[in-house]
Image (spheres, rainbow, N blue to C red):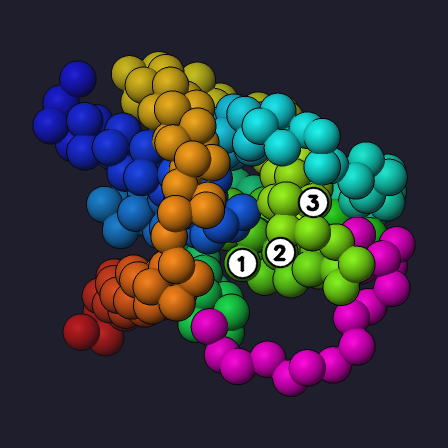
Amino acid sequence: MTALDIAITLVGFGTAALSGAAGLGGGTILIGVFYAIGMTPAEAVPLFAAVQFVSNSSRTVAYVRHVEWSAAGWFLLAGIPATLIVAPFIADVDGDVVKLVLAGLILASLAPQASAKPMPARPAFALAGFLNGSIGLFVGATGLFVGRLFFRPDWRKETVIGTLAMTQMLGHGLRVLAYGLAGFSAIAAPQRLIPLCIAVILGTMFGKRLNGWISDRAFARLFRVILIVLSCKLIWDALRGYGWI
């Protein structure tokens, strides 16, 4: 393993711990790091999807008692056809556009949200599946803009974390299949994939222990700072790619 591979593995552990504690957010940071070190979407997304499939599988197991399983059917009802429709366009995606879109989604997720009445559960889960199968196929991470669809007023925090993990696991599995069919294998870089998979499992276990130890206020502040810095890096790289900087 190179120094870069070791660094990526450590980032994978940290981001899985973040998601294990909070339920979402770690994957967005991880895919952002992949793009920030120069990976193309064809390299970054299948590797990321495979790692996040493992990470979300382990988180689903950790919170299995709290998972709302009916959400899976509605998620897949829209997620499968959306993935099949969008998959043929994978090879033509512009990496700099993906960076700008991902940065925009991250910044939008940090904006204050109006306290509107949440969407009914079934349409919300179907919309989550559609977003995973369309936008998610290109940007890789969807937790920050799909996650809010799973914040149900009658659900406990553990139910949100477990159900979101389960649906994200399904979404990443669909992405692995879509990229594989397009000729971009998730196991093209086993020296990164295997250590990352081990790291995210351990990170999830560690994050679940942290769930009740970190104050929500301190966590929110750190999380916002990390995402803002990462967004700025993605925008900078994209603008450099276009020769505007």
User: On the image, numbered disc 3 is attached to which residue?
Assistant: 159
For the residues bearing labels 2 and 3, Cβ distance under 8 angstroms: no
* Residue 166 x %, y %: 67, 35
Q: Which mark is residue 62?
A: none
**Magenta stretch, overall SS:** loop
> How many numbered discs sit on the rendered protein?
3
* Residue 200 x %, y %: 40, 28
Q: Secondary structure at mark 2?
A: helix
Q: Is residue 229 left or right of residue 206?
A: left
Indicate the amino acid at tag 1: Leu
Of badges 2 and 3, the one in the foreground is: 3
What crowding class fits label 1: few (fewer than 14 Cα within 10 Å), some (14-19), or many (20 or more)? some
Please give the name of the residue rendered at 46% of the width and 72% of the height, measured from the top-left corner. Answer: 110
Of the pair 59 and 98, the residue shown nearer to us: 59
Q: Quadrant of residue 151?
A: bottom right
For the residues bearing labels 1 and 2, Cβ distance under 8 angstroms: yes
User: On the image, numbered disc 1 is attached to which residue?
Assistant: 144
Please give the name of the residue rendered at 46% of the width and 44% of the height, measured from the top-left corner. Answer: 211
Q: Is residue 197 left or right of residue 116?
A: left
> N-terminal of the two: label 1 or label 3?
1
Residue range corresponding to the magenta coloring: 110-125
Of the pair 48 and 238, the residue shown nearer to us: 48
Q: Secondary structure at mark 1?
A: helix
User: On the image, numbered disc 2 is attached to which residue?
Assistant: 147
Image quadrant where one finds the C terminus: bottom left
> N-terminal of the two: label 2 or label 3?
2
Please give the name of the residue rendered at 21% of the width and 27% of the height, measured from the top-left corner. Answer: 5
Q: Is residue 45 left or right of residue 67?
A: left
The outermost residue toward the left is: 3
231 relative to 46, above or below: below
As measured in the structure, the alpha-carbon distance from the residue carrying label 2 to the one carrying label 3 is 12 Å
